[in-house]
Structure formats: structure tokens, C-alpha cells
Amino acid sequence: MGNCSDDVLNLDSLRKSLVREEDTIIFSLIERAKYPVNSPLYDERPGFSGSLFEFFVKESEAVQAKAGRYLSVEENAFFPDNLPPSLLPPRGSQQVLHPRGASININEQILNMYHKKLLPLITSDGDDGNYAITADRDLDCLQALSRRIHLGKFVAEIKFRESPQDYTRAILAQDKDALMKLLTFESVEEMIKKRVEKKAMVFGQDVDLSENDNVGNYKVNPSVVSRLYGEWVIPLTKFVEVEYLLCRLD
Amino acid sequence: MGNCSDDVLNLDSLRKSLVREEDTIIFSLIERAKYPVNSPLYDERPGFSGSLFEFFVKESEAVQAKAGRYLSVEENAFFPDNLPPSLLPPRGSQQVLHPRGASININEQILNMYHKKLLPLITSDGDDGNYAITADRDLDCLQALSRRIHLGKFVAEIKFRESPQDYTRAILAQDKDALMKLLTFESVEEMIKKRVEKKAMVFGQDVDLSENDNVGNYKVNPSVVSRLYGEWVIPLTKFVEVEYLLCRLD
């Protein structure tokens, strides 16, 4: 799986990571959907600087930073300011990305999409009081989505190396539309949307020992997963790719 | 799902929680199996009081404690000593369990089983350096297993209330064998083992858009999941049930 930075830069292994990450994202959505929306988790709270959700994510990221999570160029924090240093030494992996592009972090957009668009589509109304575990499930979803979307940096680097002339022209002109066109393959995007919908059906069904599958009773609506990819995951990944390429020659 | 303490005590909702928890456990195992064993994570480290794994779990549980995770009687910490207090008020749910039995915590045994037995069966050899995310996946597996196994307290309470006379006789005699016999239904256990094996096949397959399923290529060996339940999850749950009943009349 995704240890792209260690594999020099291998398109086949990157594709495998992107496909495998679909399963991770869908599992995490199913696990979040186990709980109702639990909206008090996201309300501003007296005594906290923000919501319990924000407190939980910041404190969890601090623990993970100490354990070295953000030494990996594939990982991006949601609250990267004031993270404590890693207690482990740097990993010394090869720097395959262009240094400026490597630091792109669009987690603020991902967080916004998650709260405003995705969460209402996958959760039921209600409040069961299980805020800590709900926040933990949120963080799992967010980290999986963030990892998938920021892998766009590696996709962009590979595509640049495959056709440096085409990309260089568009980069020198800082032409976002031309870059977006070079990066877009509609038939591939349609295939991804169909595949994640199918995965949501397979992973979200109620499995019992009867012969017949329990068709139609899914823990997360498969069409929501297809929409998640079509409207947010794929466009945000391409946004990362374009941002990366725009500074690729700096 | 499992908010048993709020539903007075409802056998049907408890059964649903136990079945739903199977999916959570299998997803967590599949996600852990994405990474190799990463054994340096578990080695004692100079400068840490223990391993990086232990550091990570203790610090994560401290964050979760502050966010109120252990206010729920369904949640048991792996390192319960010196946890910080919850920043949220107590939940005021009904105390449906007998107070002494409610505090049973066999997470030390679960941790031991996880490291010595389960982890070698679900991970490949190797070290990819992704220790923080690996520890995070470990904690997910452990918390799911712990929740399932400690739900035995609720199972025991329900069974006691269904047949108080039979259980009272065995409890007064402190007869563990008689209690174990009252609690054991081999045909149900066999059905659970078959169901989790089937779930591991469904959730752990590679899903693509071809017509045929990719039979035989599973992310976690389904027979390992069946064995996990048969050798550890079911026996440990029954161990919790017996321990709970032994002090039920105190």
C-alpha cells in the first residue's frame, strides 16, 4: 500500500493505493454512519476554544504527531499549526515530490465539505451522547479522504514526468484550464464512480447465513458514495494536482 | 447500535449490537492488515516508558477520556490508571448492570491475545515505517474487540433476569462450570463462527467492475476470523459473563 515516497514513483503502485484507499474510505463512512449525527459534538462549547470535535481532532493529531505520523509526506494534518515535534527521527525517505508542491494542504476545504455536505448525507438525525467515539469515527473518515485527495500530488508528479513538454507549456502560461484538461479522463472518472458505488453495496450490506443477499439495505447509501467521488473526491484531487503543477517549475 | 445502557435492557437490541460489532471488528482487522507487522512499534524504546505502541495507546486514551469516552459503561480503557477526567458531565444513563460486575475489565487479556496470537495471523512480515498509523489501526481493532467482549456483562445480566433461579443456585455455589454450562449454546456459537467467516469473505474481497467476484483473494484470511471468534472472542465473552455472574448477588 501507499508508501509512495519509498517506491521511487511507480504508477502501478500508486493506482493500487488509490483503489485500496476506496475500501478504507467506505469502511470509515459505514462506521461513522453507525452513530446519529450527534450535532452537539460540533457546537461551540464554553470552556473549549471551539467545539468538542475540534478539541478532539487537535489533541488526537498532537498524539499522532508525537508518534511520527506527519513524518510521512502522504499525511497532512487538519490543524497543522502548533503540532508538537515527532519523538521519532525523520524517515529519510526519498523526496520524490517537488518541495513546494509537497507542502500543499487543502484539509480546510475537505473539513468544510465533510461537515456541510457529506455528514448530513450519511448520518441519521439524533443524539445518542456517544461524542468521543463519534469524533473518532469522523477523524477516521477525514484522514482517509485527506490521504486519498492529497495523493493527487504524486499523480501530478507522475503525469508531469510522463509528458513534461505538454505540462511545461501549460505551467509556464499558468493556465489552470489547460492543466485541468490534461489531467481529466472522463471515462476513468465514470469507472471510479461505478466501482465505489459497487463497493458501498458490497461492504455496506447486512451479511447473514441465508443464501440470498440482503439487497437494498445498505449502511451507507451507495449513490451517496458515488456522488462523494464525483462531486468532491475527484474534483478535490484534481485541484491538488493543478496546484501542485502550477508550482512544479518554481 | 449499542447504547445498551439507555434501552433499559433489551435482548433484541443487544443481539443487533453484537452482530453489528462483527462488521466493525472485521473492517478494523482488514485495515490493520493493510500494513505489515511493523514490529519496532512494539519494542521497548529508550526515552519512552515502554514501547511506542504503549505510548500511543495511553496518550490516545487520555484524549478520549477527556472527550468523555469512558463515561459510557460499554467502554473500557486498556490503561485505565491515571486517565484524566472527562471534560463532559456524566451521562446520567440508567445503571442497568450490577455495580461490581460493571467494573470488570479484562483488557489486559485482550491485549495479550491480540499481540501474541492475532497480530501474527493477520499481518505480513516487514516494516514500512508507518508506525503511528499502524498503532492507530491496532487501537481500532482492540477497542472493537474489547467492546464486543465486554458486552458479555449485558448478556449475563439479561440471562440472569430470564432465569434467576437457575443462575442463583450456581452463583451461591460459586460454581463456574455450572455457570459456563448455563451460558453455552454450541449451535449458536457455530453459527456465529460461520457468519463472521462469511463476512470476512464479503468485506475482504477485491471488488472491481467485472462480473465475477475475485474469490479467494481476501485481505484477511476468513478462517482466521472464524478462529478469532471460536478461540478468543466467544470464550473471552463467556469469561466476562461468568465473572459478572459470580458477583451478581454481592
Image (spheres, coloured by chain):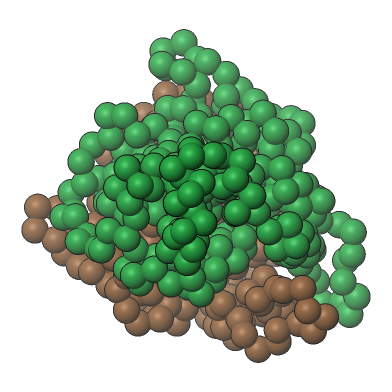
Chain colours: A brown, B green
Compared with B68, A205 (above or below) is below
Dividing the picture into quadrants, the one containing residue B119 is top right
Q: Is residue A243 visible?
A: no
Q: Which residue lies furthest to the left in this view?
A: A46
Along the viewing direction, whichever of B134 and B173 lies nearer the viewer? B173
Q: Position of residue A30 (x, y in %)?
A: 54, 69
Q: Residue at x 16, y 55 (%)?
A: B89
Along the viewing direction, whichever of A55 and B14 lies nearer the viewer? B14
Q: Which residue is drawn at 60% across and 66% down?
A: B19
Q: Residue at x 48, y 38 (%)?
A: B174
Q: Is residue A180 left or right of residue A192?
A: left
Dividing the picture into quadrants, the one containing residue B88 is bottom left
Q: Residue furthest bottom?
A: A216
Q: Where is residue A123 in the image (x, y as percent from the top left)?
A: 42, 77
How many marks are shown on the rendered structure?
Answer: 0
Q: Residue at x 29, y 47 (%)?
A: B99
**Quadrant location of the C terminus of chain B?**
top left
Q: Can residue B46 be seen in this view?
A: yes
Q: Residue furthest top?
A: B46
Dividing the picture into quadrants, the one containing residue B23 is bottom right
Q: Position of residue B51 (x, y in %)?
A: 50, 21
